[in-house]
C-alpha cells in the first residue's frame, strides 16, 4: 500500500506567520506551487497558505444581509464572519490570510485517505507532519504521479 511518505515532497518550502503577503505570492509563483505550510520558529505547523487564500483578497467587500423591522436593523449573518472576511481581504502578512489549524496527515497515512481528503474537502495541498514537525507536503500532482508506471518515470529522469 502506498503511503504519504512514499509520494510526499521532502524539500518543503514554508513561510512564517510574519512573512509579508507579497513575499509569499512570489514564493508560490516562482516555485509553481499551490500552497505552503506556515510554521513557527520551532518548525511546528500553525497554518497553511494557498493560492485561493490570496485570491480571496481580490474579492469585493461583502455587504451583510440585514432585516429591518420597526426601525430596528437586524443582521442576518454574524459580525464575526464579516470581520474575518475583512481581515483576509486586507491581509498584509501570512498570519492574516492563512488557514489556521490546517488538516495534515502522518507519513504513514495511506494514499487512499489523502485522495479522499483532497476530493471531499477540496484541498490541493496537504502538509505531512510527524511529531508536530512538517516533514513533507503532498499536492494533487504527487498523487497523479502514482498513475504513471515506474519504468516510464525512470526513462524521463535519465538524460
Image (spheres, rainbow, N blue to C red):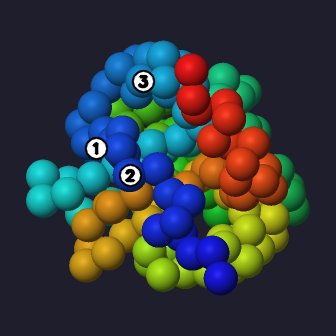
Task: Give the mark toward the camera: 2 or 3.
Answer: 2
| Residue sitting nearer the eye, 90 or 65 | 90
Name the residue located 72 percent from the left edge and 63 percent from the top edge.
Answer: 118
Labels 3, 1: front one: 3
Residue 125: x, y in percent? Answer: 59, 52
Residue shown at 75%/42% (left/top)?
152
| 66 sits left or right of 146 in the view | right
Q: CA distance from mark 1 to mark 2?
A: 21 Å
Residue at left offset 53%, top offset 50%? 84
Comes first in the chain, label 2 or label 3: 2
Q: CA distance from mark 2 to mark 3?
A: 17 Å
Please tell me whether mark 3 sits on a helix, a strand or a loop: helix
* Residue at the left extreme, as displayed: 41
Per the rendering, the mark at residue 143 is none
Q: Which mark is residue 27?
A: 3
Report x, y in % for residue 28. 50, 27
Mark 1 or 2, which is nearer the eye? 2
Dot 2: within a 10 Å radius of its alpha carbon, few (fewer than 14), some, or many (20 or more) residues?
some
Figure quadrant of the C terminus: top right
What is the quadrant of residue 126 in the picture?
bottom right
Q: How many marks?
A: 3
Asked whether residue 42 is in view, the answer is: yes
**Tag 1's secondary structure?**
loop
- Say which of 152 and 50 sits in front: 152
Q: Indicate the position of residue 7 as horizontal and vertical percent values.
A: 56, 59
Q: Is residue 19 above or below residue 25?
A: below
Give SS at disc 2: loop
Residue located beneath label 2 in the image: 10
Say if mark 3 contacts mark 1, CB within 8 Å: no
Name the disc covering residue 17, or none. 1
Amino acid at each position: 500500500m502506498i503511503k504519504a511518505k512514499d509520494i510526499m515532497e521532502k524539500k518543503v518550502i514554508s513561510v512564517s506567520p510574519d512573512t509579508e503577503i507579497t513575499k509569499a505570492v512570489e514564493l508560490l509563483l516562482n516555485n509553481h506551487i499551490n500552497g505552503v505550510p506556515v510554521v513557527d520558529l520551532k518548525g511546528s505547523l500553525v497554518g497553511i497558505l494557498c493560492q485561493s487564500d490570496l485570491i480571496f483578497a481580490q474579492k469585493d467587500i461583502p455587504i451583510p444581509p440585514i432585516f429591518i423591522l420597526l426601525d430596528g436593523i437586524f443582521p442576518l449573518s454574524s459580525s464575526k464572519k464579516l470581520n474575518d472576511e475583512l481581515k483576509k481581504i486586507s491581509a498584509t502578512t501570512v498570519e492574516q490570510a492563512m488557514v489556521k489549524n490546517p488538516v495534515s496527515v502522518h507519513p504513514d497515512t495511506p494514499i487512499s485517505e489523502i485522495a479522499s481528503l483532497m476530493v471531499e474537502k477540496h484541498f490541493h495541498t496537504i502538509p505531512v507532519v510527524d511529531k508536530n514537525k512538517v516533514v513533507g507536503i503532498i499536492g494533487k500532482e504527487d498523487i497523479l504521479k502514482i498513475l504513471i508506471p515506474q519504468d516510464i518515470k525512470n526513462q524521463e529522469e535519465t538524460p
